[in-house]
């Protein structure tokens, strides 16, 4: 049986270094979801294989989805630092292979390797935050990691365009290598090794079945009518395999001891509705972001860089409505209206996008993109919050991961289906366009630069073919958004828990990267979000029956925490952690000793039996306060109660260790 490694006590500087390493790792993994979108037309012109274009994105997303599940469990098994480092090495290898790829199939295979590394980076980054960040600050740090996803949505396409225009599309992948090496070095030097006490049970069968079943379904949708006829044995066989594999996945999950996706969650209507809507949001967002740059480069004739910039109105709409909806939800506690409005606006945005052609002005295109982004943003922020608000706390981690899983799966399906519709319509349209002028080489239609080097008369039929194709794609996706609008009406509105209200204002919740399935850590964060106000300290000290003053309570907590993790609390090490000279803290600890709560042995500070007794009173008071004030927490059974007890114990201990604020400690 594996033994637990106690969370280390880090100085503020060490915490910042660890966070920068984690942030860079998350940034690299998230960036590669979108950085290739503006480079895709050039990649296709260079490598060929236009029919496989969507798989450059889809392969990465599928591999990342599977890797996030495995990496979370492996982090508990082998330690998160090791998994983070191995994931970084895999990501470096995948990035290098992408850069040297000489045909489309090699590039897709390399993207699978890269996606495996990215999934590991994402989920271990979130887990490491729980290991090294103080409880009160954990929500803010995890929210910052979530916001990285939003930032990469902005900079990814533009950065990919810059590399494509000024260096080569290969640099969209090469740039990862030196940055990931820096992450690897920082991780080796700064990230502490922490291992879970429990040996996780890994649902290998469930993970394999859902990966194979999803891949079979996406392959069938991607190849149908493109590589093979819809009635061909290959396509029928892939659909049949997908049905069998996904059915087997459901059967396995019903019997698994620790299922990847517990089937009983679907008895909760809020989880079912939010997962469905999350799938649709991912479907529309990544699908549109992957193919919009293609439209802009071929139809409008802009550069790869400009095509990335031109998609910013969509991102602006997404951010504004995501942040705005979170603020309103936190103040009113009501969230049902947002996914309903989001579904309607999303459908409108897709329809407006389907009307674009070569004559549409830049301003009108920007307005249509803004409307599309606004529809996505209205739903993104509230789906995770709604699920976290209604599921039993025993299912908090798996339910949150489940919603994220469906969004990523939706992104994979959306990119593949957008690609299928695009290829099935474009091929005959280009044949007709090229037939109208035999003097135009087919190669001119394969590259935006070559296309716009033609005369206006020669280019017009080809440009119209691309414009009609993109319009056709968006028209076919409108019913998906309408379906989401209908499903949103089924969402049950439940009064928000205090922790959910706190999380609603955090834009990171809307983008919610994959997270480890650690139910106690998830509950700790939920409780921590609800008790960020330090004004309750006086109440805690009074109710504990202790005579401790705030400064004494802080000094006692610091002494206890460092003694527990390193065996001995030294005044110099405590001062160093808080970046103050030891002389500043000397009066506080002298006061603690004079009161009989501690004694000094050289630099070491040791709690006396009386001090230990006072500390236990404070911990007990914290636990009682949490239990009484978090009355909106629903407990569904003995398992919930056990998790709640464990989380409350952990939180009470950490709050006692961390209290009060640093300015109090210096008095």
Image (spheres, rainbow, N blue to C red):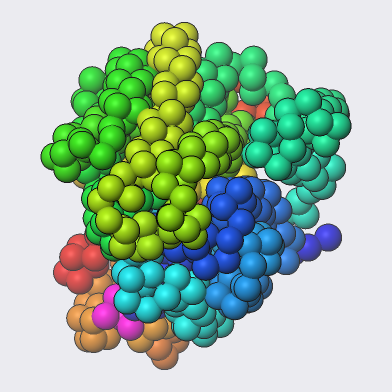
Q: In this orientation, does residue 209 appear?
A: yes
Is the stretch drawn in magenta largely helix, strand or loop?
Answer: helix
Q: Can residue 285 be seen in the rendering of this structure?
A: no
Residue 278 position (above or below residue 548): above
Residue numbers of the magenta segment: 574-579
- Near-viewer residue (247 or 496): 247
In this orientation, which residue lies closer to the viewer: 61 or 333? 61
Residue most extreme to the front: 438
Percent position (x, y) of residue 197? 71, 58
Viewed as shown, does residue 203 lie left or right of 72? Answer: right
Quadrant of the snapshot with the C terminus:
bottom left
Whether residue 514 sits left or right of residue 215 in the image: it is left
| Front residue (pair 631, 86) | 86
Could you tell whether 177 is left or right of 196 in the image? Answer: left
Residue 634 x/y as whole percent = 51, 21
Is 604 inside the magenta-drawn segment?
no
* Residue at the far bottom in the pictured view: 602
Total numbered labels placed on residues in the image? 0
- Nearer-the-camera pick, 302 or 595: 302
Q: Residue at x 24, y 65 (%)?
A: 662
**Residue drawn at (43%, 28%) of the image:** 472
**Residue 1: percent from the left, percent from the top?**
83, 60
- Vertical arrangement, residue 221 with respect to residue 138, above or below: above
Picture quadrant where residue 626 is located: top left
Q: Provide residue 430's location: percent of width, then percent of height.
A: 48, 42
> In the rendered view, would you say 191 is above or below 341?
below
Could you tell me which residue is drawn at 42 percent across and 90 percent down? 602
578 in the magenta segment: yes
In the picture, measured across the screen, residue 188 lies left or right of residue 332, that is right
Residue drawn at x 24%, y 32% is 368
């Amino acid at each position: 049986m594996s033994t637990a490694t106690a969370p280390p006590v880090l100085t503020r500087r060490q915490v910042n270094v660890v966070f920068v390493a984690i942030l860079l790792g998350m940034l690299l993994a998230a960036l590669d979801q979108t950085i290739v979108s503006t480079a895709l037309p050039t990649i296709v012109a260079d490598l060929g294989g236009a029919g496989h274009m969507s798989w450059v994105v889809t392969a990465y997303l599928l591999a990342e989805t599977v890797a996030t599940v495995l990496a979370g469990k492996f982090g508990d098994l082998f330690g998160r630092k090791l998994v983070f480092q191995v994931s970084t090495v895999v990501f470096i290898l995948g990035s290098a292979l992408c850069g040297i790829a000489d045909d489309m199939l090699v590039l897709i295979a390399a993207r699978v390797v890269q996606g495996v590394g990215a999934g590991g980076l994402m989920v271990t980054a979130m887990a490491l935050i729980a290991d090294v960040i103080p409880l009160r600050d954990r929500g803010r740090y995890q929210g910052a990691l979530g916001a990285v996803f939003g930032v990469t949505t902005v900079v990814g396409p533009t950065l990919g365009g810059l590399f494509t225009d000024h260096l080569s599309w290969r640099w969209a992948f090469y740039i990862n290598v030196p940055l990931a090496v820096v992450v690897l070095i920082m991780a080796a030097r700064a990230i502490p090794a922490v291992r879970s006490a429990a040996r996780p049970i890994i649902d290998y069968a469930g993970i394999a079945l859902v990966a194979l079943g999803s891949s079979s379904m996406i392959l069938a949708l991607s190849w149908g009518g493109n590589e093979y006829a819809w009635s061909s044995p290959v396509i029928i066989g892939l659909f049949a395999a997908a049905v069998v594999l996904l059915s087997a996945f459901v059967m396995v999950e019903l019997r698994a001891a620790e299922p990847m996706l517990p089937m009983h969650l679907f008895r909760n209507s809020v989880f079912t509705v939010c997962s469905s809507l999350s799938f649709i949001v991912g479907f529309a967002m990544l699908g549109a972001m992957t193919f919009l740059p293609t439209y802009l480069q071929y139809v409008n004739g802009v550069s790869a860089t400009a095509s990335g910039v031109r998609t910013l109105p969509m991102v602006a709409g997404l951010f504004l409505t995501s942040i705005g909806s979170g603020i309103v939800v936190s103040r009113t506690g009501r969230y049902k209206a947002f996914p309903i409005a989001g579904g309607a606006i999303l459908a409108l945005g897709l329809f407006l996008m389907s009307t674009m052609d070569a004559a549409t002005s830049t301003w009108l295109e920007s307005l249509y993109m803004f409307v599309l982004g606004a529809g996505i943003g209205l739903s993104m922020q509230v789906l995770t919050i709604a699920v976290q608000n209604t599921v039993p706390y025993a299912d908090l981690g798996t339910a949150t991961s489940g919603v994220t899983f469906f969004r990523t799966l939706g992104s994979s399906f959306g990119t593949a289906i957008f690609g299928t519709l695009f290829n099935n319509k474009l091929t005959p349209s280009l044949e007709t366009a090229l037939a109208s002028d035999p003097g135009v080489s087919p190669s001119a239609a394969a590259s935006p630069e070559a296309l716009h080097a033609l005369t206006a008369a020669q280019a017009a039929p080809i440009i119209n073919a691309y414009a009609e194709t993109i319009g056709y794609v968006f028209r076919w996706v409108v019913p998906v958004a309408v379906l989401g609008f209908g499903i949103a009406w089924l969402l049950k509105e439940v009064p928000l828990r205090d922790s959910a209200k706190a999380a609603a204002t955090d834009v990171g919740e809307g983008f919610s990267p994959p997270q480890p399935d650690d139910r106690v850590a998830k509950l700790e964060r939920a409780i921590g979000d609800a008790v960020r106000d330090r004004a309750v300290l006086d109440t805690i000290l009074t109710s504990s029956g202790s005579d401790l003053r705030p400064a004494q309570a802080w000094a006692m907590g610091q002494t206890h925490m460092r003694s527990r993790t390193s065996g001995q609390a030294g005044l110099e090490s405590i001062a160093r952690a808080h970046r103050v000279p030891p002389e500043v803290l000397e009066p506080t600890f002298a006061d603690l000793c004079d009161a009989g709560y501690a004694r000094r042995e050289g630099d070491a500070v040791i709690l006396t039996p009386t001090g230990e007794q006072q500390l236990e009173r404070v911990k007990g008071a914290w636990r009682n306060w949490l239990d009484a004030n978090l009355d909106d927490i629903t407990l569904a059974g003995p398992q919930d109660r056990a998790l709640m007890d464990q989380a409350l114990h952990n939180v009470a201990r950490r709050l006692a260790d961390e209290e009060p604020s640093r300015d109090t400690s210096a008095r």
